[in-house]
Amino acid sequence: MGGLTVSTPRLKRKNYTWLYFLLPSIAIMLLFFIYPILLTFFYSFTNLALTGEAAKELKFVGFDNYARMFQDPTVRVSIWNTLIFLIGSAVIGQQVLGFLIALLMKHKSKVFRRVIGTVVLAGWVTPEIVCALCLYSFFGDEGTLNAILSFFGISAVTWLYTVPMLTIILANIWHGTAFSMLVFQAALDDVPNEIEEAAVVDGASRLQILFRITIPYIKETITTNMMLVTLQTLGVFGLIYAMTGGGPGTSTTTLPIFMYNQAFVNYQLGYGTAISLLLLLIGIVLSLFYIRSLKE
């Protein structure tokens, strides 16, 4: 008994070596993401401007910019235009059209899929400003669309002035549908053929297979794609600005366009940053909604 010794286990020290490898990523995130958001949040409570008396001395104005924003009728018009543009081009346009193209390409030959995929991808890989100029030429008074109409004896239409919102919605659909097509194409290829074949044997129609098997099977992909397309569409600026400039009047003035006009045309940076935070808040709310849908 006298020679018996009892050893106590050593407490293992936690290894934080992995943290050193994450430091560059953390530094980049803090510098280029967190810091600009905090700086924008601070400037939204100031009278920051590029010209005039406000440019001489930066002052804290509290919630004056936000009070002005919610009293400005143009803000309400911009929010409404943003929602119309979002629903028309992202929810109805890119999402539905991308799914239909991917569905039609399923079980087709490789040559067919490559040709159609290349044609659809042409719009996506085209830079936004180039896409805007192409669609401006298409919908212009003497553009391609009116040339086609005149060939059939139909009088020309001033599309960019008569239906400006429709033109930018169609332009954004053409520009971004390929992304949804690629996402849905990968998801549809993962749907087991055995399930669909068993449903056919049981007498299910194509629509029943689509709505009761295919769509429920890829519902998580649909929600994820919807979130990505929504966030991308909320920030669309160059396409709208190059085609209509937010006009005629305020008919196509979305929140990014209105924010740009206030910050860099009217030189009221404090007011412009407050509008940008409103846009950020809308994106956060929609993202939380989609994330909750994924969990359910």
Image (tube, grey):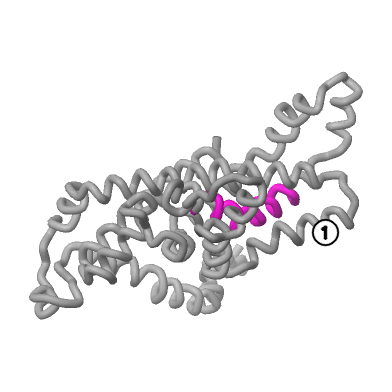
> Which of these two is toward me, 186 or 23?
186
At label 1, which amino acid type do we have? Arg
53 horizontally vs 113: left or right: left
Residue 29 position within the rendered picture, expressed as x and y whole percent measured from the top left = 44, 71
Residue 187 position within the rendered picture, expressed as x and y whole percent measured from the top left = 73, 47
> Which of these two is toward me, 110 or 250?
250
The quarter of the picture where residue 45 lies is bottom left
**In the image, what residue occupies the spot 47% across and 52% down?**
158
Residue 172 colored magenta? yes
**In the image, what residue occupies the spot 20% across and 50% down?**
72
Q: Which residue is tagged 1? A: 114
> Which of these two is toward me, 78 or 235?
78
Where 16 sits versus 200, above or below?
A: below
Name the image quarter holding the C terminus. Answer: top right
Q: Which residues are magenta?
A: 168-186
Name the image quarter holding the N terminus. Answer: bottom right
Residue 269 position within the rendered picture, expressed as x and y whole percent measured from the top left = 23, 69
Tag 1: Cα neighbours inside 10 Å, few (<14), some, or many (≥20)?
Answer: few
